[in-house]
């Protein structure tokens, strides 16, 4: 089904637009070129793959085999260097390949669904543009602390006699290693932040969908068409990112278990000089994985909240219709004031950011269902109950239950590994 959606999506050939002074993607395009991940032309593609090969493969390999410093003291030996370099390079390679495929196949504007914003409301367009401008700040929020910590360690390692090469060689080697770390970290977090940005757009659409459901001129057909459009976009997102999310989870799990196996050996040296870089690598990878899983589960939770919203809409309409049939007064005289929005106006003061248009305790205003029959409302609620939307990985829904399952599997494997190494049962 996802392949059919992707085929339909590719039928329209879109011409990629260049960057100009009013382009909302100007900063992203500049950042792509500066990081050498832009492949919009043959020359830039060759440069992109050259920089990737140099900083992801060649420099880590040279760092591990030529700068391992087996004759150094205990503080300068790189016991965990192999796991660190392999973990960072594998995740960066996966991110770069996926990012190259996205950029080549769809283009940045189409990949971020900016070509579809003309069909959205002004609120969705403005909020998405603001989030797009904040994405670079979010990227640096995760990358810079890790890079500062890594820079501190590398500068200390080279300046305190970690190698026997001349001073100028130390400076060049240190710059290359820091550039490699920064490049691999940024490429990984860039894909994670882009996924978060796309999921944020779907949340905005779902919140706008709640307004469509309660609009005075809405009918069941228009609500159904809008929900089908959102479901289709969620399937497209799932199809594009399923390989990246799945293999990221596999690579990071393997990296963490390899780190756990090395650090639980009887003679393992866990001083900050020896294991600090490994811990920094694990924290960086886990932070990116949390961005992916949180974004996916959040959009799935919001998409499934539509069922609760529609059921509440149907219940309010049914109760209101019975009041109208049993009384000579209009239903507004018997119903709780919908303008207050809650069971008791004092409760409204206790509500904060935990409620939004999709997940709230507000009553549905009467005009939202006054012209829709019971059978149509029931059919729509039944449709929502049996067609839950969300981000999926090869058919498996990424929701909170999936997170509990992943956590249970990881905890079981960890306890098994600890039982084999330190005797924990």
Image (tube, helix red, strand yellow):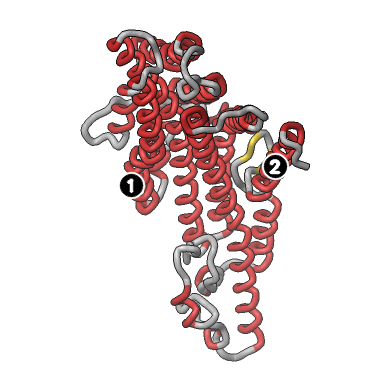
Q: Which percent across, then down, holds residue 274?
A: 50, 27
**Residue 184 drawn above or below residue 419:** above
Q: Where residue 29 appears, x then y in whole percent?
A: 32, 28
Quick one: quadrant of the C terminus?
top right
Question: Which one is nearer the viewer's eye here, 346 or 155?
Answer: 155
Q: Find residue 9 and name its label.
A: none
Q: Considering depth in this image, is 341 or 190 the residue closer to the camera?
A: 190
On the image, the x and y values in percent for residue 391 come to: 59, 42
The quarter of the displayed image where residue 394 is located: top right
| SS state under label 2 | helix
Q: Is residue 206 above or below residue 372?
A: above
Above or below residue 233? Residue 318 is: below
What residue lies at 36% left-to-right and 14% top-to-bottom?
A: 173
Q: Residue furthest front?
A: 73
Kindly identify which residue carries mark 2: 411
Residue 341 visible in the current orientation? yes
Q: Residue at x 38, y 46 (%)?
A: 128
- Is label 1 in a helix, a strand or a loop? helix
Whole-angstrom CA distance, mark 2 to mark 1, is 38 Å
Which quarter of the rendering shows the N terminus? top right
Q: Is residue 188 left or right of residue 412?
A: left
Residue count near mark 2 (Cα–Cα under 10 Å), binned few <14, some 14–19, many ≥20: few
In the picture, the disc for residue 130 is 1
């Amino acid at each position: 089904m996802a392949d059919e959606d992707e085929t339909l999506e590719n039928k329209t050939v879109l011409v990629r637009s260049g960057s100009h002074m009013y382009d909302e993607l100007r900063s992203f395009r500049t950042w792509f070129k500066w990081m050498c991940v832009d492949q919009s032309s043959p020359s830039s593609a060759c440069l992109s793959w050259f920089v990737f090969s140099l900083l992801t493969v060649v420099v880590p390999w040279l760092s591990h085999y030529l700068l391992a410093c087996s004759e150094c003291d205990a503080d300068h030996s790189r016991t965990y260097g192999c796991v660190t370099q392999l973990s960072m390079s594998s995740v960066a390679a996966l991110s770069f390949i996926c990012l190259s495929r996205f950029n080549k196949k769809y283009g940045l504007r189409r990949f971020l669904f900016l070509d579809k914003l003309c069909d959205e409301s002004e609120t969705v367009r403005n909020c998405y543009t603001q989030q797009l401008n904040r994405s670079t700040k979010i990227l640096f929020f995760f990358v810079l602390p890790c890079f500062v910590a890594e820079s501190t360690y590398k500068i200390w390692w080279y300046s305190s006699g970690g190698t026997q090469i001349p001073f100028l060689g130390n400076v060049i080697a240190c710059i290359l290693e820091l550039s490699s770390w920064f490049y691999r970290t940024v490429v990984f977090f860039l894909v994670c932040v882009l996924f978060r940005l796309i999921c944020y757009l779907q949340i905005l659409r779902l919140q706008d969908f709640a307004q469509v459901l309660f609009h005075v001129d809405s009918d069941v057909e228009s609500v159904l068409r809008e929900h089908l459009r959102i479901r289709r976009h969620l399937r497209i997102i799932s199809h594009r990112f399923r390989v990246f999310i799945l293999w990221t989870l596999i690579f990071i799990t393997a990296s963490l278990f390899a780190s756990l196996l090395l650090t639980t050996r009887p003679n393992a040296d866990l001083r900050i000089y020896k294991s600090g870089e490994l811990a920094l690598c694990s924290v960086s990878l886990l932070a990116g994985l949390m961005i992916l899983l949180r974004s996916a589960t959040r959009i799935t939770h919001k998409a499934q909240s539509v069922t609760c919203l529609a059921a509440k809409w149907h219940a309010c309409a049914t109760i209101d219709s019975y009041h109208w049939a049993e009384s000579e007064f209009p239903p507004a005289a018997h119903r709780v004031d919908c303008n207050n929005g809650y069971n008791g106006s004092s409760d409204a003061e206790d509500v904060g950011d935990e409620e939004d248009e999709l997940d709230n305790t507000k009553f549905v205003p009467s005009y939202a269902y006054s012209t829709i029959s019971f059978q149509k409302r029931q059919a729509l609620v039944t449709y929502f109950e049996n067609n839950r939307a969300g981000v999926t990985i090869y058919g498996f829904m990424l929701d909170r239950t999936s997170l509990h399952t992943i956590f249970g599997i990881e905890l079981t494997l960890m306890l098994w590994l600890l039982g084999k190494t330190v005797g924990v049962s």
